Amino acid sequence: MRIDKYLWCIRFYKTRTIAAEACKKNHVRIDGSPLKPSKEIYGGEKLTIRHNQINYIIEVLEIPQNRVGAKIVDLYRRDLTPVSAFENKEALRLAQDYYRKKGTGRPTKKDRRDLEDYIDENESE
């Protein structure tokens, strides 16, 4: 089965077109080498997929005949992604929220002064 169709069948991507574009952008790899969307895959291969700033590691167990339901996806793939990858993404999200919540507006005068002081300290070194 083609890699783009497989990723669509196991519900990793919403559409086959999105899966094909991810392959073209080198987000899908086997053993570190990028794949074309037409690459045939077989059971037992390990895929590395870059999706939402996480490198997912998926092992192909079987090839489905067509798109499968969400409840039985685990029959066709095994997720080997380390938990630390998800923790890093959560830490990154929290670090971005720490300074200013999204949509709260422009920086204040105090924020600008603090930034200028920080830049001046680094330039003097």
Image (cartoon, rainbow, N blue to C red):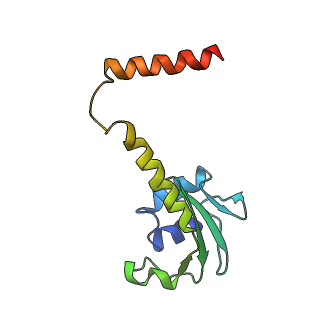
- Residue 112: x and y in percent read 39, 19
Q: Position of residue 53 (x, y in %)?
A: 52, 52
The residue lying at 56 percent from left, 81 percent from top is 63
- The quarter of the rendered structure image containing the C terminus is top right
Rendered image quadrant of residue 100: top left
Can residue 65 be seen here?
no
Residue 70 appears in view: yes
Nearest the camera: 79 or 114? Answer: 114
Q: Position of residue 3 (x, y in %)?
A: 58, 67
Q: Position of residue 65 (x, y in %)?
A: 50, 82
Residue 113 against residue 43 in the figure, above or below: above
The residue depicted at 43 percent of the width and 21 percent of the height is 114
Q: Residue, x 47% and y 74% (percent of image)?
A: 10
Q: Which residue shows up at 59% across the image and 54% down it? A: 27
Q: Is residue 63 above or below residue 104?
A: below
Q: Is residue 83 left or right of residue 30?
A: left
